[in-house]
Image (tube, rainbow, N blue to C red):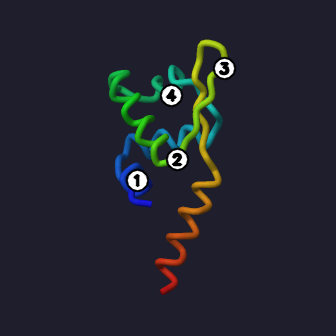
Amino acid sequence: MDSVYKALADPNRRKILEILKIRDMPVHAIAMHFDITGASLSHHLDILKRARLIISQRQGRNIVYSLNTSVFEAVVSALISVFQK
């Protein structure tokens, strides 16, 4: 769960999640929403993948990213249990 909290702590990574909430996207489409280098974007995507908040799938030459909704359900459950005590 620590990796999830670390991933959510950064505003760029939260913005990536908001973008992917709308629809699955290849990296070049995600990049259009940011003014950061490709290396920085790759780093943010890697942290989100290691936290299992997003998943990637190769489609031809593109890698398409999408939200991993099952992990979000677990995070919400964990947060609810913290605040119910």
Are the residues tagged 2 and 3 within 8 Å (C-beta)? no
- The mark found on residue 52 in the picture is 2
> In this image, 63 relative to 11: left or right?
right
Q: Is residue 65 above or below residue 54?
A: above
Label 3 vs 1, first from the N-terminus? 1
Label 2 vs 1, first from the N-terminus? 1
- The mark found on residue 59 in the picture is 3
Identify the secondary structure beneath mark 4.
helix
Are the residues tagged 2 and 4 within 8 Å (C-beta)? no
Please name the residue that numbered disc 1 is placed on: 3
Q: Amino acid at mark 1?
A: Ser
- The mark found on residue 78 in the picture is none
Locate residue 58, reporting x and y percent.
Answer: 62, 23
Q: Nearer the viewer, residue 51 or 82?
A: 51
Which-is-in-front pick, marks 2 and 4? 2
Label 2 vs 3, first from the N-terminus? 2
Identify the secondary structure beneath mark 1.
helix
Which-is-in-front pick, marks 3 and 4? 3
Identify the secondary structure beneath mark 3.
strand
Q: Nearer the viewer, residue 19 or 40?
A: 40
Distance, label 3 to label 4, CA atoms, is 16 Å
Label 2 vs 4, first from the N-terminus? 4
Please name the residue that numbered disc 4 is placed on: 30
Q: Is residue 62 above or below residue 15?
A: above
